């Protein structure tokens, strides 16, 4: 597992995995970008979408231990 300092928060609008985790119809899945992945993945990492979020290392360790 990567350290929390290497994690990136990705807004739901940019994350195809959110479609399935939040539920969708078969038609929505068929027409979604889930099959190809996000277009931003083909860009240089410096152009990937991200938001600055702070991560509490202690909370990460607690979650990992569950």
Image (spheres, rainbow, N blue to C red):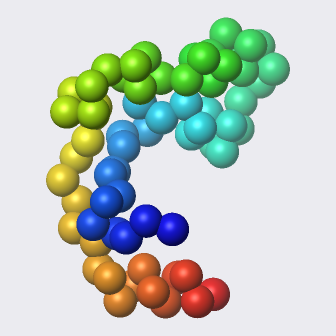
Counting from the top left corner in percent of width and height, residue 9 is at: 33, 51
Q: Residue at x 43, y 38 (%)?
A: 12
The image quadrant that residue 29 belongs to is top right
**Side (left or right) of 51 relative to 24:** left
Residue at the farthest right position: 26
Q: Residue at x 60, y 17 (%)?
A: 36
Q: Compare residues 1 and 31 and report the one nearer the observer.
A: 1
Using the image, determine if residue 28 lies above or below residue 52. Answer: above
Q: Residue at x 40, y 19 (%)?
A: 42
The image quadrant that residue 11 belongs to is top left
The image quadrant that residue 54 belongs to is bottom left
Residue at the farthest top position: 31
**Side (left or right) of 37 relative to 54:** right
Using the image, determine if residue 18 lies above or below residue 39. Answer: below
Counting from the top left corner in percent of width and height, residue 28 is at: 69, 17
Q: Residue at x 35, y 89 (%)?
A: 58
**Side (left or right) of 30 relative to 5:** right
Counting from the top left corner in percent of width and height, residue 33 is at: 58, 17
Counting from the top left corner in percent of width and height, residue 62 is at: 49, 89
Which quadrant is home to the C terminus? bottom right
Q: How many marks?
A: 0
**Side (left or right) of 64 relative to 23:** left
Using the image, determine if residue 47 lies above or below residue 9. Answer: above
């Amino acid at each position: 597992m990567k350290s929390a300092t290497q994690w990136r928060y990705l807004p739901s609008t940019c994350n195809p995995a959110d479609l399935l985790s939040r539920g969708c119809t078969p038609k929505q899945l068929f027409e979604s970008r889930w099959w190809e992945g996000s277009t931003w993945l083909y860009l240089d990492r410096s152009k990937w979408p991200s938001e600055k979020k702070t991560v509490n290392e202690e909370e990460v360790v607690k979650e990992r231990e569950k």
